[in-house]
């Protein structure tokens, strides 16, 4: 049921958001050099690496590390990157990852390929057994403001309690938090 829901919602959103996605693509292209989409190597279900698309919000030369590990993250942000991140619009291309089955709408956020500490913590709790998500309990409970261990504990809580109703609740709360920009660091 989860996969069917993911497919129906992803197709619906791609249709409804076609023109905003097109507009954002044009803004990215005219505001900074480089590709519109940034393909990030991420850790998926069963620790398989997959390419996750995001609207590019950072300069081409940005090191491939979590944003909080950069010395001066603001230096690397493109002219519209901050807006894309604050509104979570940079995440829209992940609808593609949902369509092809690499991600779900709800689950643990996919770790970067080089986040070995996060990978180990998740493996210790068997969290590698579920698909990563665009949003999850950690995103609605604090997002960028939570320490890594706390995020992983929330991912485990989701893993243990996952259900269709919990997914709907997380999606609704996520939308509310995006609108009020709660828990976003950039």
Image (spheres, rainbow, N blue to C red):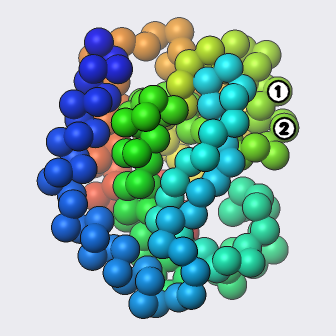
Regarding residue 166, the answer to whether it shows in the image is no
Quarter-of-image position of residue 77:
bottom right
Cβ atoms under marks 2 and 1 closer than 8 Å: yes
Q: What separation in Å lies between label 2 and label 1 (alpha carbons)?
A: 6 Å
Q: Residue at x 69, y 36 (%)?
A: 49
In the displayed structure, would residue 25 be above or below residue 67? below
Q: Is the C terminus in the top left, top right, bottom left or bottom right quadrant?
A: bottom right
The residue nearer to you, when weighing 133 against 48, is: 48
The residue nearer to you, when weighing 93 against 91, is: 93
Which label sits on residue 166? Answer: none
Q: Assign a secondary structure to mark 2.
A: helix
In the displayed structure, would residue 78 be above or below residue 134? below
The residue nearer to you, when weighing 76 against 161, is: 76
Can you give x and y, in whole percent of width and height, for residue 43 in the image?
68, 36
Which label sits on residue 120? Answer: 1
Q: Residue at x 58, y 80 (%)?
A: 34
Q: Residue at x 50, y 58 (%)?
A: 54
Q: Residue at x 31, y 36 (%)?
A: 171
Can you give x and y, in whole percent of width and height, for residue 87 in the image?
37, 64
Which label sits on residue 116? Answer: 2
Can you give x and y, in whole percent of width and height, for residue 124 in the image?
79, 16
In the displayed structure, would residue 125 be above or below residue 75? above
Count of numbered tags? 2
Q: Is the N terminus in the top left, top right, bottom left or bottom right quadrant?
A: top left
Horizontal relation, residue 44 to residue 47: left or right: left
Q: Assign a secondary structure to mark 1.
A: helix
Q: Residues within 10 Å of mark 1 (few under 14, many from 20)?
A: few
In the displayed structure, would residue 167 be above or below residue 26? above
Can you give x and y, in whole percent of width and height, for residue 162 in the image?
43, 13
């Amino acid at each position: 049921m989860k996969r069917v829901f993911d497919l129906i919602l992803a197709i619906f959103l791609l249709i409804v958001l076609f023109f905003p996605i097109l507009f954002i693509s044009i803004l990215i292209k005219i505001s900074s050099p480089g590709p519109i989409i940034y393909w990030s190597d991420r850790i998926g279900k069963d620790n398989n690496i997959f390419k996750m698309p995001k609207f590019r919000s950072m300069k081409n030369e940005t090191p491939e590390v979590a944003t909080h590990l950069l010395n001066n993250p603001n230096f690397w942000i493109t002219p519209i990157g901050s807006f894309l991140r604050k509104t979570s619009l940079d995440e829209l291309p992940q609808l593609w990852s949902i369509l092809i089955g690499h991600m779900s709408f709800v689950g643990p956020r996919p770790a970067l390929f080089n986040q070995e500490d996060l990978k180990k913590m998740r493996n210790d709790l068997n969290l590698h057994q579920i698909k990563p998500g665009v949003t999850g309990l950690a995103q609605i409970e604090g997002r960028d403001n939570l320490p890594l261990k706390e995020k992983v504990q929330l991912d485990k809580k989701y893993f243990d309690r996952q259900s269709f109703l919990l997914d709907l609740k997380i999606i609704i709360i996520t939308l509310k938090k995006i609108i009020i920009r709660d828990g976003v660091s950039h």
